[in-house]
Amino acid sequence: SLRKEKGMDWILILALSCCFLVLPITGSTSWLDSGTTSFSPEGRIHQVEYASKAISMARPVIGMVTKEGIALIGIRAISSPLEEVDEPGFGEKVHIIDSHMMVACTGVAADATALVGRCRETAAAHRQRFGEGLPPRRLALRLADTFQAFTHQGGLRPFGAAVLVA
């Protein structure tokens, strides 16, 4: 989670400074594209930018709160008339996580599928341990922790998917 501790600002500044000291002065910097912990000479993390672009280019999902309840809406993309759209789960954007909770995903389909699986596992573990449903806010916080971990740990890449929790 993103909790700011007192006196920790100087550690972040020092860490960022050290990252820039190890950058090559000349030559190709294409190796910077593959890591989530490497800054480019311009101060950018390309993998994070690629994930953001994948999300911004995807079809939108919308969440609405009304007097009657909450609605999550997603637009499915069918690229060919030969695709089997009657297949269960094909191109779905809205997923039931538990009896009281659902999510809507957009972005890279494989990343969205992985995130939905994590949501279901988290909700099931909470229900088994505490005998009640996981609050949607808690699921959102757990997802935020997952996104953060995949952005900052070496060997992983940021998810190219966004999730609405309701």
Image (cartoon, rainbow, N blue to C red):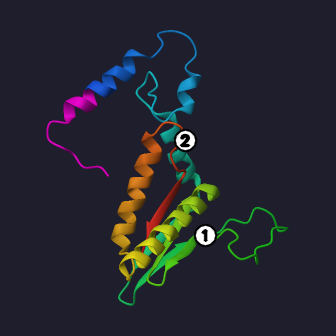
Image point 46% across, 28% down: which residue? Answer: 38
Are there few (<14), some (14-19), or many (20+) residues within 10 Å of tag 1?
Answer: some
The quarter of the picture where residue 93 lies is bottom right
Q: Nearer the viewer, residue 160 or 127?
A: 127
Which SS class for mark 2? helix
Frontmost of labels 1 and 2 is 2
Which SS class for mark 1? loop
From which residue to which does the magenta span run?
1-13
Q: Are marks 1 and 2 in contact (CB under 8 Å)?
A: no
Task: Determine which residue is flagged by label 1.
Answer: 75
Residue lying furthest bottom = 68
Which of the labelled discs sits on residue 50, or is there none? 2
Q: Amino acid at mark 2?
A: Tyr
Q: Position of residue 156 (x, y in %)?
A: 53, 42
Question: Compared with residue 35, is residue 84 higher up or lower down, i.e. above or below?
Answer: below
Which of the labelled discs sits on residue 155, or is there none? none
Quadrant where the C terminus sits is bottom left
